[in-house]
Structure formats: structure tokens, C-alpha cells
Image (cartoon, helix red, strand yellow):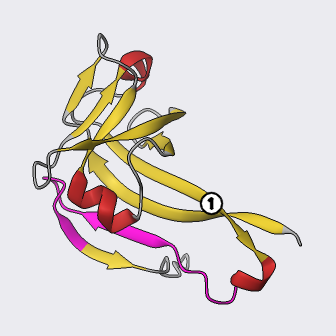
């Protein structure tokens, strides 16, 4: 049976709080954000930097719940600075038979990385 790689979870436009070059590579993410987006500690994530266009892959580590921390660490720290807006995404394989019920976990935050809404679909945006 075939499967498709689908967006499983997304944390949209979080603000980078730390950029730690001399730390073991990963991205520390507030545990509340991880849970809301269904991202597990040590799971592979893709990060898209809205400020500079960088796109890179790393893995998630758990940050203190409620702290709002988004710390890009190790070599990836060259790709994101404190204050940069990021989109953090995880993907998973979904079988054709599961596609009808499949819904991603989309998390939207405020300027302090606090959850303001959670959705299962991206609203259609039509150009005027």
C-alpha cells in the first residue's frame, strides 16, 4: 500500500529566543508548543526562517513548559538569530486509506510564543 509524506505538525511564526552556536545541535522548543503540534522530543523537524529564507533540518528537544523558548543550537545557530521568525514543521507518512481522516496539528503563536490558536487546516487565502 502506498503512502504520502504529509505535514503532521507546524508551529507558525515563532520568535527565536536564543541562538547557541557552542551547544549540541538541535532546537529547544517550549514543551507546550511541542505537545500542541504533536512533535516529540528528538523528532526530526524542518525549520524555515521567515527573516532570511534559510531552510534547514534538525531535531527537537524539550524546553521548559510555558517558557516560550525557541533556541536554535549548534551549526544551525548560523541560520537563525534571536528575534528571527521561524516556521517549525514535522512530517509523517500517511497511508492512502488514512488520508480521509488525516488532519495536521497547526499551532499559531503571539510575539511571546504563547499559543493563540490551533487548527487542523490552513485557511484558504485568495489574492484580491
The N terminus: image quadrant:
bottom right
Please identify the residue farthest to the bottom as the structure is shown.
100
The image shows residue 45, relative to residue 92, as above or below, that is above
Q: From the top left corner, tell me how far across and down residue 68 is, in percent.
A: 15, 49
Q: What's the residue at 49%, 53% (across, down)?
A: 89
- The quadrant holding residue 25 is top left
Q: In this view, does 7 lie to the left or right of 85?
A: right
Q: Is residue 100 magenta?
A: yes
Mark 1 crowdedness (10 Å alpha carbons): few <14, some 14-19, many ≥20 = few
**What residue is rendered at 37% in x and 45% in y?**
86
**Residue 120 in the image, given as x and y percentages of width and height:** 46, 80
For residue 88, above or below residue 103? above
- Taking the image as shown, residue 40 lies to the left or right of residue 111, namely right
Question: Residue 121 vs residue 109: left or right?
Answer: right
Magenta stretch: give its range. 99-116
In what element is the residue under mark 1? strand
Q: Secondary structure of the magenta portion, mostly?
A: loop
* Residue highlighted by disc 1: 92
Q: Is residue 11 magenta?
A: no
Q: Is residue 60 above or below residue 82?
A: below
Q: Residue drawn at (50%, 32%), measured in percent from left and top?
A: 54
In the current view of this chain or complex, which residue is farthest to the top? 22
Could you say which quadrant of the image residue 74 lies in? top left
Amino acid at each position: 500500500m502506498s503512502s504520502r509524506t504529509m505535514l503532521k505538525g507546524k508551529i507558525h511564526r515563532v520568535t527565536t529566543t536564543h541562538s547557541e552556536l557552542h551547544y549540541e545541535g538541535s532546537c529547544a522548543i517550549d514543551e507546550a508548543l511541542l505537545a500542541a503540534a504533536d512533535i516529540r522530543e528528538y523528532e526530526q523537524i524542518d525549520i524555515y526562517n521567515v527573516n532570511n529564507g534559510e531552510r534547514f533540518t534538525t531535531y527537537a528537544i524539550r524546553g521548559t513548559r510555558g517558557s516560550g523558548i525557541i533556541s536554535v543550537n549548534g551549526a544551525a545557530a548560523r541560520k537563525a538569530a534571536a528575534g528571527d521568525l521561524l516556521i517549525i514543521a514535522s512530517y509523517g507518512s500517511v497511508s492512502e486509506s488514512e488520508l480521509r481522516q488525516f488532519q495536521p496539528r497547526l499551532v499559531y503563536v503571539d510575539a511571546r510564543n504563547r499559543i493563540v490558536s490551533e487548527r487542523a487546516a490552513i485557511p484558504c487565502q485568495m489574492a484580491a
